[in-house]
Amino acid sequence: MKTKRISFKKIGDYLFTTIVTAAIISSVFIAIPRADKALGLGDYNLVTKDSQYWKKTYTLEIQLPENDKDQKTLKIEQTKNILQRRLDRFGVEVVKIQNGSKPRTQDAGTETTESENIIKEYIQITVQTTKDQNAVEALIYNRNYIRIVVPKDDIDFNDPDNPLATYDINNYEKTEFTRHDFRTIYIKELDTTSGGRAYFAIYKSWPHTASSFKKFLSNYAGRTIGIASDGFVTQYTVPIEFDQSYIESLERSNNRSSTSPEFAPAVSQDAESAKVADILYNSGVIPEPYSVANIEDSTPYIYQVDYEQVAIALIAGTVAILIFSAARKEQKKEENIRLALTVVALFTLWISTLKLAGIPTDLFIIIIEGFVLLSLIKVNLHSDDIRLSFSAAALFGIIYLLSSGYTRILSKDLIFLTLGAWIITTVIGQYFTKMKDIILK
């Protein structure tokens, strides 16, 4: 009596096709508008950014020394470029910065005292974004000019009648060290002495200032100094490890630490605040002080796209491809069916992921990405060379690094979607081959 040998390959093929079929069908019903709710799969709405947008125009008053008339244009352009860089790095979708004029009405709190030695110039910044308003305004409002200061000897910082004494810059003497003396200020999350975690600003000196700054820290080791920014001072106790005599004593006892101490004041325990601080520290030094002279609210302009109509158009197009394929030659028929299956699988899985994860998105960006992905799918169907997909992803990566606003958002999405398109194209190719074998047998 002969026994049939179990074909694990066939079992694997059946299992593979079943899983892929179930995934495609499920994602189709989740992606199609209202179909998920009608079939009792839950209510998965596509979250759009439309209601999250806000728009404001800020007028900044820049105070320039009168003896710097020749440098006026240069300093204004430097200020505009640094503010643009800050907002771009934070991911603000729409930024427009231009020269402005004195507002007709200024808030009493923002007016500055007229002076014969000061020239006042104005720039306007218009932003439209979904980013946190407090974070965006922190990037606009703060010049963030860093200077190391030391406490004055005659100030009592423990006076209960003056609790704000530690923050007042008038209670400190200036030192020679400013933001210009540090090549970068690196933000890093580290352990705290209390056992928690926080973000610290690690100051890295330029080679020509490292020695003098190290000597300064040695003189103040174990004592309190201040870090001044925009008239506000944050106190910092210099670690005893900076003391040269302390270092020499460790060397004599052969107990010196293998790592050098870092000048690293705490910044924040919040990742978003740390990101803002990183951008403020490392986007350039604004040359002159400024203030916010006026703020105007505006209604954001939003690209209106009907998601339901787009989904219906995609479904209709896929059905048309399948009908058209029935009348074509066998080779073209298979190619078109593979194309239709790949498009359906990729787009529905993509939309389903956005719905299930609740990721806010711009519908017009989805449509643009859809056209790009359709082209990539057709390329992948004619070539199995993964280098094409990696090259496309690398290109989008370069665009991401060099761009801002919506272009940056689009290119970031396409980096992942390009690789996803190659994976889906490969899987659907295997799926189509196995399904054809199963049906024909």
Image (cartoon, grey):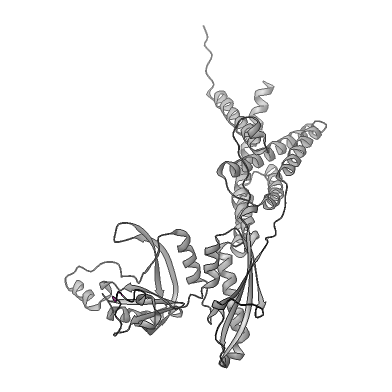
Along the line of sight, which residue is nearer the eye, 293 or 206? Answer: 293
Q: Is residue 425 visible?
A: no
Vertical placement of residue 318 versus 160, above or below: above
Vertical placement of residue 425 versus 54, above or below: above
Along the line of sight, which residue is nearer the eye, 72 or 42? Answer: 42
Kindly give the residue lying farthest to the left in the view shown. Answer: 253
> Which quadrant holds residue 16?
top right
Along the line of sight, which residue is nearer the eye, 114 or 3? Answer: 114
Along the line of sight, which residue is nearer the eye, 393 or 301? Answer: 301
Which residue lies at the image location 40% right of the left edge and 80% below the top edge? Answer: 169
Which residue lies at the image location 60% right of the left edge and 33% below the top edge? Answer: 23
Vertical placement of residue 139 versus 210, above or below: above
Q: How many labels does the image show?
A: 0
Kindly give the residue lying farthest to the top in the view shown. Answer: 1
Magenta region, residue range: 156-160
Vertical placement of residue 128 versus 383, above or below: below
> Which quadrant holds residue 164?
bottom left
Q: Is residue 160 found left or right of 441 in the rendered image?
A: left
Which residue lies at the image location 34% right of the left edge and 70% below the top edge? Answer: 262
Which part of the image, by quadrant, shows the C terminus?
top right
The percent position of residue 102, horizontal first and vertical second, equals 65, 80
The percent position of residue 321, horizontal first and vertical second, equals 78, 37
29 falls in the magenta region = no
Which residue lies at the image location 51% right of the left edge and 77% below the top edge? Answer: 285
> Which quadrant holds residue 114?
bottom right
Q: Is residue 178 found left or right of 136 in the rendered image?
A: left
Q: Is residue 236 visible?
A: yes
